[in-house]
Image: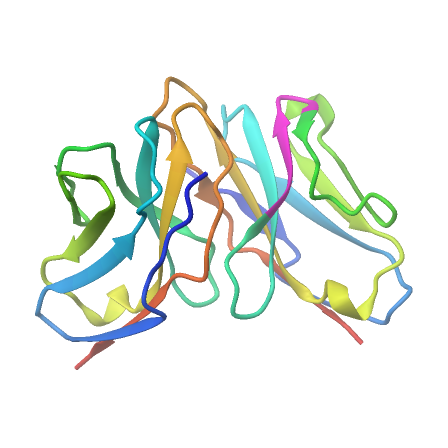
Amino acid sequence: DAKTTQPPSMDCAEGRAANLPCNHSTISGNEYVYWYRQIHSQGPQYIIHGLKNNETNEMASLIITEDRKSSTLILPHATLRDTAVYYCIVRVRGAQKLVFGQGTRLTINP
Amino acid sequence: EAGVVQSPRYKIIEKKQPVAFWCNPISGHNTLYWYRQNLGQGPELLIRYENEEAVDDSQLPKDRFSAERLKGVDSTLKIQPAELGDSAVYLCASSLVWGSSYEQYFGPGTRLTVT
């Protein structure tokens, strides 16, 4: 599985959009980009995933660059409850193993 | 729908003692995972079950760790004897594998402290 690089921490004001970057320059054509988050004292929670097209669901949007070497998770209107560690994971199509890095600790400030 | 259930939530034991963790996956999920999460790190897979079969246990320290998933539903992870370095959060997850777009649903974890 390709390795990902994320900033260790970020801050965002409540109500603003939180943009979390992820670099995955060695991603291959059959690898998906997944995002999970982990709120304190809870297990990780699936957010969204994509292959090459931008994706949106009720939680977030995922923007993947055309060369697929990086992506951005967007929380459009961050709330205090979005404070968590966010993990960007690259996974081969059909593989069931998730390899977590250290993620980005996002703090939403009031 | 109930999520992944784990018990206990917290456990404190002395080194060299045994300990066991229990997991009840989401109903109908055929795949079950045990992860270990050290402080400040992301979760690391210990073992993965498909139904009753352990299909990936390459990261499970087999000298002291064991796991079972009887009847392809609940699972138990055991450590015997525990060492100080085993202090971590043990997470259970489950998924219903279909196609290439599946999600893993995690339980709240068991925080183990070995003294």
Q: Is residue A81 left or right of residue A43?
A: left
Residue farthest to the top, as pictured:
B99
Q: List x then y, in percent, for residue A95.
A: 47, 28
Instruction: Give, as a single range, the part of the protein colored magenta.
Output: B45-53
Q: In this view, does B14 lie to the left or right of A47?
A: right
The image shows residue B53, relative to residue A103, as above or below, that is: above
Give the camera-side residue of B96 and A69: A69
In which quarter of the view is residue B55 placed? top right
Q: List x then y, in percent, for residue B67.
A: 76, 39
The image shows residue A32, relative to residue A83, as above or below, that is: above
Quarter that holds the N terminus of chain B: top left
The image shows residue B35, relative to residue B86, as above or below, that is: above
- Residue at image position (52%, 64%) is B41
Instruction: Give the color scheme: rainbow, by chain, secondary structure or one colour.
Output: rainbow
Q: List x then y, in percent, for residue A69.
A: 25, 45
- Magenta run includes residue B46: yes
Q: Is residue A82 left or right of residue B80?
A: left
Q: In this view, does B32 lie to the left or right of A30?
A: right
Quarter that holds the C terminus of chain B: bottom right
The image shows residue A74, relative to residue B67, as above or below, that is: below
Give the camera-side residue of A18 and B104: A18
- Residue at image position (54%, 54%) is B43
Q: List x then y, in percent, for residue A61.
A: 15, 47
- Magenta run includes residue A98: no
Q: Please, what is the dominant secondary structure of the magenta stretch? A: strand
